[in-house]
Image: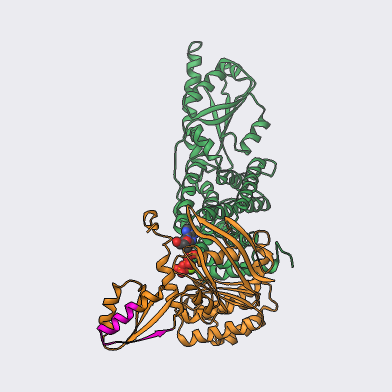
Chain colours: A green, B orange
Amino acid sequence: MNHLFSFSRLFALLAKEMTQMMRDRITFGMMIGIPLVQLALFGFAINTDPKQLPAALVTTSQDQFTRAIVSALEVTNYYRFDYVGISAKDADELMLEGKVSFIVTIPADLSKRVLRGDEPQILIEADASDPSASSGAVSTLSTVAKQALTRALGTQSQQDSQLDIVVHRRYNPEGISQYNIVPGLLGVILQLVMVMMTAMALTREVERGTMENLLAMPATPFEIMLGKILPYLGVGAVQVIVILVAAKMVFHVPFVGSLALLISGILVFISSLVLIGYFISTVAGSQMQAMQMSFFFFLPSLMLSGFMFPFKGMPYWAQMIGEIFPLTHFLRLVRGVMLKGADLEAMRSPMLALMGFTIILVILSLARFRKTLD
Amino acid sequence: MKAIDVRNLVKRFGDKTVVDNVTLSVEEGEISGFLGPNGSGKTTTIRVMCGLLTPDAGEGSVLGYDLHADQLKIKRQVGYMTQKFSFYTDLTIEENLYFVARLYGLSPARTYVRDTLDKLGLTSRRHQLAGLLSGGWKQRLALAACIMHKPKLLLLDEPTAGVDPKARREFWDEIHDLAAGGMTVMVSTHYMDEAERCHRINYIAYGKLLTSGTVDEVVAQAGLHTFILSGKGAQSASRMLQAENGVDQIAPFGNSLHVVGKNKALLETAVNKASHQFDVRCEPGQTTLEDVFIQYMSGSTDNMAEPELEGK
Ligand SMILES: Nc1ncnc2c1ncn2[C@@H]1O[C@H](COP(=O)(O)OP(=O)(O)OP(=O)(O)O)[C@@H](O)[C@H]1O
Ligand SMILES: [Mg+2]
């Protein structure tokens, strides 16, 4: 028999954990209940009005009219042009990756047309997968641009400026916020339940004194850890199914991306959550402490991940903090895949970030292995 | 080979030394009793020996395996019954036994579980939650679960606390059977009659091992003398003797009085004085193990006590 790992011992631990889980009606109910209740509550969106959203400017002209319009847009404080003068293709790429919320396309011959008295077109593409982020910015846009053009013309001609502003809401043409909230909820609910349940599962053993018995038997710490983690991965899977089905059937959230990519993302995300829970349980002395620590972790990540408030609308420091939560990266991934149909190439950075978290957490948990009671 | 052979074990929690330089050995097939007042470090010593706690100092071997290096091997051949019931109260009796059987790789698990249930007489109640068992039945279940894998060494931490006399008798019959079959048993207890059923006893107080040996050896080593006073005047004699030199302990047993002291001459004078003054008969008696332990307890200082009290 292998000394460090044996499947029969792992099986013993798994069977025991599952039996306990099934027997605990309240916890079992929580697994299904929490997603449903949360979906019902958060399904009604919270709207916010963020400023300073990153935008890309696609244009080749540098004339006064273009400058006037761009600076007027910046003055509204809704737009921040991080990328100027890039190609339409690059801009598309940036939006898919979630790096910009808007693409403003100004034709190269804008000044010629304005002076000729034509009606030039300006195209604004908004990433509407997060409608709360884009709605304010889009609604002010056409007045601001027209005024800017009139002012620029003012010195040269008396005629009224003609400007045709075309707004494309991409990924979510109708600006429905459930589309954004429901995939986000997938991440939030998984985080709430996974971290807390795993954290409490191991502390319960310590609190009830069964840990002493468990450690006195030949189970290795690695087996004990796996025995705790795997059942909760299963719980997570059940929740994912509940939420995805509800998203489709109740909220009619479109699913345009690859299911396989989404599922691999979810797997990595859940692994990181369960490991966080495990880590908490190695630090906490009681179930109460474990619960409090889970919440201590849960609340800021909820606030700063881009679930409650549009990520790009937060102050820089808050965004920096937001980056340290797996949830932030998972939200990018789930929204990208579900709503925008992003592929692995486009989702590389959130995916890598999630994997990074998982690896770090595995190392941390291994280091905190408890072989003894002290 | 000795089943347990540890030297100079030290275990501290914070700045409190809970196990203080304990050297202990147990022969194979022996039933070794572990006695001492509450908080003296019995549980802690047992935990160190089965690899649950890392000692701060000391070395030794358990079942021939090194205490530091081979903890996993030790665990596989040791059965440890914890002081507090530590099986899963939310699992049934049968599920708990399956869990243990699978964890030790006993196969087929079903046979082991069925035999254990049969022997316990719990077959008809096997689907009952372990948490709903009465205290005594919990202890029996726990013992049955820790001997299922036929360990070479059985460490029992107060296994009979709260168990009725008949069950206690059966418990000890079983322990003697197991020892006869070659199993080494170390058992902690607060009951004197249980101590007397052990081949050897070890007495620990406030972290220090004060004495070990057979019951007779321990009693003899203590060097105590005992007189038994009986009669109508016993009550009054007791009050008078309390003030006498040479009387270390007075304990009433029904209508008689055990008077114990270290100094035989002084004790005899005091007892004679009492028999002259009061209506009591006085005869030399057997010093019991309990007398010896009470003597040790009053002579040593409390682990929990404040430092200024320690010097008293
Ligand atoms: N994990 C721990 N942390 C701090 N102190 C501890 C710990 N475990 C035990 N102690 C202390 O060590 C001392 C010895 O405890 P231990 O449980 O070994 O005593 P015991 O002889 O088994 O007592 P009892 O007969 O009451 O079971 C006690 O004072 C206890 O408070
Ligand atoms: Mg104890």
Identify the residue at image location x=53%, y=82%. Answer: B197
x, y percent for residue B249: 36, 74
Q: Foreground: A341 or B77?
A: B77
> Is residue A251 among what the camera can see?
no
- On screen, residue B217 versus residue A3, left or right, reads left
x, y percent for residue A228: 59, 61
Identify whether A162 is placed above or below B277: above
x, y percent for residue B274: 29, 81
Q: Foreground: A170 or A259?
A: A259
Identify the residue at image location x=65%, y=71%. Answer: B3
Q: Decide whether residue B281 is among the magenta residues.
A: yes
Q: Foreground: A247 or B160?
A: B160
**Quadrant of the rendering where the N terminus of chain A is positioned:** bottom right
Identify the residue at image location x=53%, y=27%. Answer: A80
Start and end of the magenta stretch?
B269-285
- On screen, residue B107 versus residue B96, left or right, reads right
Q: Residue furthest top?
A: A156
